[in-house]
Amino acid sequence: MAQFSDSSYNTKLYASYRPEYPQSFYKILTEALEPKNIPVNRVIDLGCGTGVATYPLLELGKEVIGLDLSQGMIDTANKLKQERLLKAGISDASRITFIQGRAEDFRDQPESFDLITCAECLHWFTDYESFFRETYKLLTPGGLLAYWYYIDPLIMDYTGSDKALEEENQRIFSAAKAIYCKYVYDDPKYMGPHWEQPGRSIVQNGYREIDSKIPRELFTGTTVQAFEPATAKSVPSSKDLVLEKTIGLNDFGDYLKTFSAYSAYKKATNDPDNVIELVLELLERECGWDRSTTNIKILWKTGYTFLRK
């Protein structure tokens, strides 16, 4: 998680181009919170980043705290606070607070949170036994621990370019996936070696390593749900976290720039080949797309785990 705490990391880009979680997922989360009365009293969002997942929690809790180790992330979250509250139609700014810190800082407040969330961050934690122990202590009786992830967007469709026949479309989608995998993972000249491990491998493996460490004697009512789209025809269920977005190619390039591996790669090499530009040029050439007119629909591999105290 060191790259997100690095002063050179672009937190504003992160706030602008990371996907937002859909209302359908917060409905699933709300149902999991029952029989607690909604809104619950207190919610804490660990590893909150710039607050992408934190603001919707105001629909579930009267008081929401966003907590992150990165001061840069917290600074950006606070700078965006007024704008995001206005967008959410919430006038009472005291209901949400962003603080630099960790869960252990709240040890003097046992059983004080009805909901603890971790969105797209738990794979960067290092001591899962301690994580589960500390969150258990913070939860009220019957409280919920919820963590979720997303990884590796799959291009499902495109507009703004002449649509090809089905067989050609499959070639186009395969070519786009191959370009992504080469520059994000496979070619040692680019981002691949710069992913922090074992964090990236943990999320690639669908958080199975984390789930295997759940202390079953502490938590009950375990729910584990995963959605792994393999092709453009993959269909999610009503219980899946469906994370999709339609964006232009330039925005897709800016999304890739939010990767911690890109930040580390650029810092280590000064990005001599301009890797994001290289990816966009190849998508145009190999897929017949145009960054000025083409929009792509992307769908992420996702999963979540809910644990009740």
Image: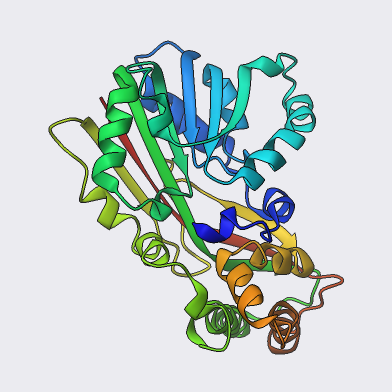
Which x, y percent locates residue 174?
55, 82
Task: Give residue 47's position: percent from left, percent from top.
Answer: 50, 42
Residue 6, by quadrant, is bottom right
Q: Residue at x 51, y 59 (%)?
A: 2
Q: Quadrant of residue 238?
A: top left
Q: Nearer the viewer, residue 249 or 132?
A: 132
The location of residue 4, given as percent across then percent down, is 58, 55
Does 138 sit left or right of 69 as displayed? Answer: left
- Residue at x 74%, y 89% (from the top left corner): 285
Residue lying furthest left: 217
As displayed, is residue 148 above or below residue 271? above
Q: Residue at x 79, y 70 (%)?
A: 294
In the picture, measured across the screen, residue 251 lies left or right of residue 45, that is right
Name the residue: 48% across, 23% down: 43
Foreground: 89 or 64?
A: 64
Query: Which quadrant holds the C terminus?
Result: top left
Q: Give the image location of residue 143, x and y in percent.
A: 33, 21
| 30 horizontally vs 99: left or right | left
Image vertical order of residue 83 relative to residue 63, above or below = below
Q: Is residue 163 above or below residue 302?
A: below
Q: How is the image coloured?
A: rainbow
Any part of residue 90 in sight: yes
Q: Residue 142 sits in which quadrant?
A: top left
User: Residue 80: in sight, yes or no?
Assistant: no
Left or right relative to 304: residue 268:
right
